[in-house]
Image (cartoon, grey):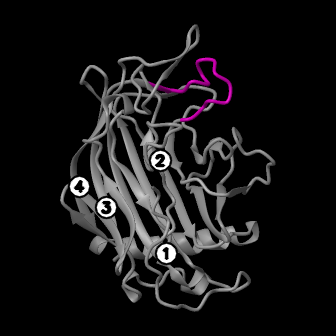
Amino acid sequence: MRTSTGPVPPPRALTAPSTDLSGRAHRHADDDGGPRWSARGASWQLELGELVLAHSMGGERMPTVHSPRPHLHPVRSLRGRLLTDRSPDDHRHHYGVSLTIPDVDGTTYWGGRTFDPEHGPMLLPNHGHQHVDHAQMLHRGATLRQEIRWIDQDQRPQLHEQREVTGAGLEETEAWALRWSSALRAEHALTISSPAVRGRPGAGYGGFFWRLASGDEVEVLNSAGAQDIHGAPARWVSVAVRHSEDWTSLVLAQQSADPVPWFVRASDYIGLGPALAWDAPLELASGEVYPVEMLAVVVDRRVNADEVDRLLELGEGRVQAARSA
């Protein structure tokens, strides 16, 4: 059963959508004792007081056919609302928030079946895995850094990833922010691809991916103003999910100046992320480093498009302050 409730934070003054937040964006991280990572055995928790906002887990217990990998689950709002799903019935290989690619030189790190142009989706023995070699806390605990090896189906290293995940509080806006920074370094020349590149229309998924918990109603907004953002580039996408009478919103923003197309599902299930190889393969030379930079803001209400830029500015400012501590 889903756990969708939790401890309620202390009463706080809420910021009206029209309020200027820029003056408080860069306050020092210690001003409010923002979220901090702590070790819990072989895993890590991002905690804000007694609240556990995110849990970072390795992939040691994942089945081989799910492409074992480190991931975040559960991720919760300040009011305890669950924002992630792990190994759901519809896609057992979906695990919370992760960096996952369906095809790196023929190895899948996505899990599940591989699309074959002649036979369709097939379960093949081509699953790689991601192994966390080292983890440490930085910036007085605001950031979790992990050194991760991507190992292919033949047990050979393909990519080395340095991942940093930073949390920051935005309690006055009923929100908190998560900054995900990954640097993927190719161990040798390689090609990153997707099912769409191989002939499955619309299936350009692969990269940073956030699988959300289901709800009673879903609303998707985006910075491009597109009716359907699936397959289109945009700086940010916001997903609001209603549970009974309560709404929770997730805003995801690409930090690149040149956004890539988004993979978005909001009907059969809720999941989204920017696509590394939407309609063309991504070629990396040996030693080349590819950055994946994302900012997420989790809000305990239904977010309007007019306030997203301000929330992102505040979130980025708080993250920068946390990282400078």
How many C-alpha atoms fall within 10 Å of the one at disc 4: few (<14), some, or many (≥20)?
some
Q: Using the image, determine if residue 269 lies above or below residue 123.
A: below
Q: Using the image, determine if residue 139 lies above or below residue 214.
A: below
Pointer 1 or 3: first along the chain: 1
Q: Amino acid at mark 1?
A: Leu
Whether residue 283 is in magenta: the answer is: no
Q: Main secondary structure of the magenta part?
A: loop
Residue 205: image x %, image y %? Answer: 56, 35
Q: Amino acid at mark 2?
A: Val
The answer to whether the residues at label 1 and label 4 have Cβ atoms under 8 Å apart is no
Q: Mark 4 to mark 3: distance in Å?
A: 7 Å
Q: Would you name the residue on which mark 4 appears?
A: 135
User: In the rendered structure, which segment of residues is drawn in magenta?
Assistant: 191-205
Residue 261: image x %, image y %? Answer: 65, 41
The answer to whether the residues at label 4 and label 3 have Cβ atoms under 8 Å apart is yes
Q: Mark 2 to mark 3: distance in Å?
A: 16 Å
Q: Would you name the residue on which mark 2 appears?
A: 292
Whether residue 198 is in magenta: the answer is: yes
Q: Mark 1 to mark 3: distance in Å?
A: 20 Å
